[in-house]
Structure formats: structure tokens, C-alpha cells
Amino acid sequence: MTDFDVRTANLRALNSLTKYPSIPTYHALDPGNGGLTDKVVEFVGRVHLTEKVDGTNSRIVVLPDRTYLIGSREELLYAEGDLIGNPALGIVDALLDVASAMAPYGTGIVTYYFEVYGGKVTAASKHYTGSRRVGHRVFDICVIDDYATMLDWPTERVSSWRDHGGQRFLDEDELLRVAAGNGLATVPRLDVLDAAELPTDIDKTHQFLVDRLPRTTVALDGTPGRPEGIVLRSGSRSVIAKARFQDYERTLRRRSGGR
């Protein structure tokens, strides 16, 4: 049994511990103009490609006492048993039944990260649905075993720990196993390549995106629309990066003299 009690826990620290970290772009962004530079994230060995779904980053946090929280990327929106939940972006409505049925995993704090998409979630929702249907896909799972000490940390220390890779994410095989055990759909797996097969030029990477993902593979109804991009990750999840169509298109337009 655990003596964890969400009613007495430091919720500010808990929120910070379970936020999703920023993911670098495959080609680094120029902070001066927002365009891409020629520097790439370096991968070694096998690289897993998944579709990057254009939705809102959401999370289900399963606590050591087997209760749960639902949150957006920045804030917690609902705790198990609440009479009223924050309706922001429809996240709680989309994930409440999922959270209620979540199977136990380990003895620590386990956070499931989702893209909730479609509906009226983002301006890109039209690429996934014409009838305002809402979907959700798991894209990462994080486990924090030594949470007790960290819940006493000031939020600044928690943020620094998170931003410097302190969270432990499940590797590819374990992520798929745990998601399947909960009946959860993951973001689509597109391919597995050797790192040497990845393009490094900006124009060739853009063409790589076009060839690999001409349309979204997670449309909820109707004709699939424009995808956001591809996420590249090592099997261990120790290296991860995102490649978005809009970043490459904007950069190539600027280099060709367009706006």
C-alpha cells in the first residue's frame, strides 16, 4: 500500500513533474527569424517514424493511490471524483472514460500523453473531421518512481529537472505493450529506418515528409487532409525530434525569395 494522498500532495510540483517537455525540431530553429538552420538532431541506429498529429497536448496522470488526474500541457483540469471539471478544449470530455478504465502499471506516477484532436480543438481540426468528431492518440508514457522526494522540491527545481531530461519515458516496445494493455490507440507508426537513411538537407527532408506522409492517416471521417509532420525517435526514446511541414515550407519560401 502507498501513503500517497492526492488531497495533501503538492499539486504545483505534481503538475510540473508530469508536464510534457519541449521536443526539438529535427533541423534546429533559428531564434532570429524562426526558420530552420542546417544543423540536425543526430540519430544512431534504428529510427522510428510516427505521425505528428495536430491536436492539443493532453495527459492522464495515474497516481500511486490509483486515482487519476486529467490535464492539458500546462495545467491540471480534473481530479477523479470532481463534480466539475475545467472544460478547456474538450480534453476532460475526451479522456474521462479512458482515465476511469486505466489499468495499474508499477507503483509510481505514470503519465500518459495524448494528442486530442478534431472537434474544434485547433484550426487544423478540419483536416481530420468534417463533422466535429474528436479523437485521441497516445504518443508517450512517462514513469516517475522516486516521486516522494521530488514532490517537496520547489517548482523551479522541478522545471529544471524536467527540462534537462529527468523524466523516464518508456521505450518503443514497452510503450506499445502498455498502450495495447489499456486498449489505447497510439499515434500511427509509419516506418523504421537506419539513421544513415535520414536526409540532412532541408529540401530533401521536406521531400522526405511529402513522400512518407502525403495525407494524415488518422482522419476521423471523410477525406484525409493535411498532416502536421513526422516525429523521429530512437527505440529507447533517448533521442527524439519533430519535423513539421510548415517549418520546411516557410524556410524554403524564404530561401527562394518568397514570403
Image: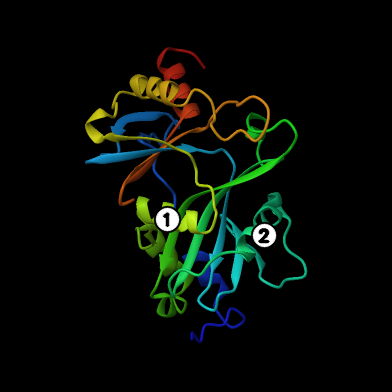
Residue at numbered disc 1: 177
Structural distance between the alpha carbons of marks 2 and 1: 20 Å
Q: Mark 1: which amino acid?
A: Arg
Q: Does any portion of residue 43 appear in the rendered image?
A: no
Image quadrant where residue 200 sits? top left
Q: Is residue 126 above or below residue 11?
A: above
- Pick the front one: 12 or 236: 236
Q: Secondary structure at mark 1?
A: helix
Q: Does any portion of residue 188 appear in the rendered image?
A: yes
Q: x and y percent of residue 192 in the render? A: 33, 36
User: Left or right of 103: which side holds 131?
Assistant: right
Give the residue drawn at x 48%, y 86%. Answer: 1
Q: x and y percent of residue 214 in the render? A: 49, 22
User: Left or right of 117: which side holds 179?
Assistant: left
Q: Is residue 234 above or below residue 153?
A: above
- Pick the front one: 50 or 78: 50
Give the residue drawn at x 64%, y 65%. Answer: 100
Q: Is residue 190 above or below residue 177?
A: above
- Residue 97, disc: 2
2 or 1: mark nearer the eye = 1
User: Left or right of 204: which side holds 226?
Assistant: right
The mark nearer the N terminus, 2 or 1, is 2
Q: Is residue 42 above or below residue 258?
A: below
The extreme top residue here reads: 257
Q: x and y percent of residue 121 in the render? A: 67, 42
Contact check, label 2 and label 1, Cβ < 8 Å: no
Image quadrant where residue 37 sits? top left
